[in-house]
Image (spheres, helix red, strand yellow):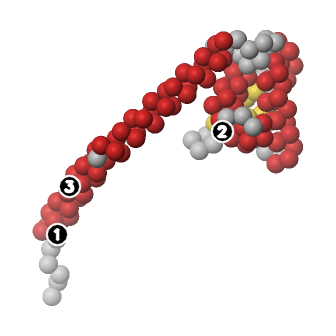
């Protein structure tokens, strides 16, 4: 079971959005489509969807390139808590904090010139390999 369960209202909203998008498009919706329809952020949508998947309300079909959601048992929505606990908010805060830290790390990598140095080393290695290859290449037949 999920560490944090969404509220009953959020669960009903997400399940209704899944059903509406399934009806409109003819295929199970992606979490991004649900976020757009509901006006939620991606992290909030993923968190609520993951909670509903773990709770047995939704099923997530994941491929290396895509994830889609479909309703499995909507009756379980009535078992969800009425009010949102602090755990859900702390989970969203933790996600935002780690996302911000990751972005700062990437920004630092790009601003420090580390990427340029790595690219320069790789280019030099490729040039060296190409030079060796040209030396080994036999002369054309006469």
Classify mark 2: residues with Cα within 10 Å, few (<14), some (14-19) or many (20+): some
Q: Residue at x 24, y 57 (%)?
A: 123
What's the CA distance linking mark 2 and mark 3?
39 Å
Q: Is residue 7 above or below residue 32?
A: above
| Image disc number at residue 67 | 2
Q: Are marks 2 and 3 in contact (CB under 8 Å)?
A: no
Q: Are marks 2 and 1 in contact (CB under 8 Å)?
A: no
Q: Quadrant of residue 139?
A: bottom left
Q: Earlier in the sequence, mark 2 or mark 3?
A: 2
Q: Is residue 128 left or right of residue 102?
A: left
Q: Earlier in the sequence, mark 2 or mark 1?
A: 2
| Residue 71, x across and y down, in percent | 80, 30
| Residue 60, x across and y down, in percent | 69, 32
Q: Earlier in the sequence, mark 3 or mark 1?
A: 3
- In this view, the mark in front (2 or 1): 2
| Image disc number at residue 125 | 3
| Residue 6, x across and y down, in percent | 73, 19
61 vs 39, nearest the viewer: 39
Element class at badge 2: strand
| Image disc number at residue 134 | 1
């Amino acid at each position: 079971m999920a560490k944090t369960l969404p509220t009953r209202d959020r669960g009903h909203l997400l399940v209704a959005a899944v059903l509406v998008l399934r009806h409109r498009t003819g295929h199970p919706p992606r979490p991004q489509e649900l976020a757009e329809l509901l006006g939620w952020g991606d992290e909030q949508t993923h968190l609520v969807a993951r909670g509903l998947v773990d709770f047995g309300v939704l099923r997530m079909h994941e491929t290396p390139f895509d994830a889609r959601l479909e309703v499995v048992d909507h009756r379980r929505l009535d078992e969800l808590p009425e009010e949102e606990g602090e755990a859900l908010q702390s989970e969203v805060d933790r996600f935002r904090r780690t996302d911000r830290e990751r972005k700062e790390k990437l920004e630092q990598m790009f601003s420090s010139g580390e990427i340029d140095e790595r690219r320069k080393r790789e280019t030099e290695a490729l040039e060296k390999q190409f030079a060796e290859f040209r030396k080994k290449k036999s002369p054309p037949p006469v």
